[in-house]
Amino acid sequence: MKRFLKQHLFPSEDPLKLLRHNRGIIILMYHSVHPPVNKVDYKYSISSEDFIEHVRILKDNTNIISTKDILSNKNISKDKLNVAITFDDGYKNNYSIASKKLAEGDIPFTIFLTTYFMKRRFNSFLDWNQIIKMKESMDVIFGSHSVNHWNLTMLDQNELVYELSNSKRMIEDKLNDKIDLLAYPGGGFNDNVIEIAKEVGYSAAFKDRIEKGNENNNQFHIGRISIDQSNSAINSFIGTLNRVEKFTKIKK
Ligand SMILES: [Zn+2]
């Protein structure tokens, strides 16, 4: 209703102007970014043309920060919308397409890896050489997205510990770095998942959605908004940034 009134009372309000006046923090969740020539019938794969345009819009109108900035409450602008960019699953095109565009502008981003996909050398997923190259040359943070991408709430305790600790350890060994961020596969989590995630050494975890109210800013309930084929067209993307619930700080 509110949106209806807004649109009708202020029909000429420029969406980019609204974006420039926006405040707070929002985290975007991307998956795959495919070349424009390929029409991809997968909701979570958007075209590189749209992605390049998203990056331009964010650069010109918002303050782009990293997930760690949000967690440590650093580099957060009070006069702009703060946006962090994340990718789930570890698609190969994150390296071949998206990361190159982001690196051009020195833009920070985070990739959550599902380690079984790397281990099996599946064709559409990143390999460790690409991951290491990104780590060495870009402003990227890697996190875990479990081993097998199963719904963590459906597992028994041993499986859960395995999914969370084994993926973490594997990325740590390959990158020789501490990994302490987690994204819940399919967004599935509960109190038990959170407890085990803390026990095996994660410091924060990200969801695949945004809730109403205050449920987006707890360290293990960090809300993200999916950018996929349903909202990647430019007007829809800007509308999404203007519309979704923001938060201002992570609660420790
Ligand atoms: Zn996923």
Image (tube, helix red, strand yellow):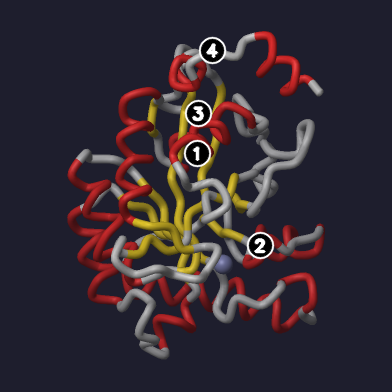
Tell me the kind of residue under disc 2.
Ala
Give the Cα separation between the discs numbered 1 and 3: 25 Å
Q: Residue at x 53, y 41 (%)?
A: 27
Expressed as whole percent of the image width and height from the top left, the position of residue 218 reads: 69, 40
Read off the residue under disc 2: 197
The residues bearing labels 1 and 2 have C-alpha atoms spaced at a distance of 32 Å
| Three-letter amino acid code of the residue under disc 4 | Ser
Residue occupying the point 44% across, 21% down: 16
Residue drawn at x 46%, y 51% as measured from the top left: 86
Name the quarter where the C terminus is drawn: top right
Q: Is residue 143 visible?
A: no
Residue 90 horizontal side relative to residue 130, left or right = right
Q: Which disc, if any, is residue 12? A: 4
- Residue located beneath label 1 in the image: 237
Q: Quadrant of the N terminus?
A: top right
Q: Which mark is residue 73?
A: 3
Q: Give the mark nearest the N terminus, 3 or 2.
A: 3
| Looking at the image, residue 240 lies above or below residue 102 | above
Question: Which secondary structure, mark 2?
Answer: helix
Estimate the spatial distance between the alpha carbons at disc 4 and disc 1, rounded to whole Å: 18 Å
From the viewer's perspective, is residue 178 above or below residue 247?
below
Sooner in the amino-acid sequence: mark 1 or mark 3 = 3
Alpha-carbon neighbours of circle 3 within 10 Å: few (<14), some, or many (≥20)?
few
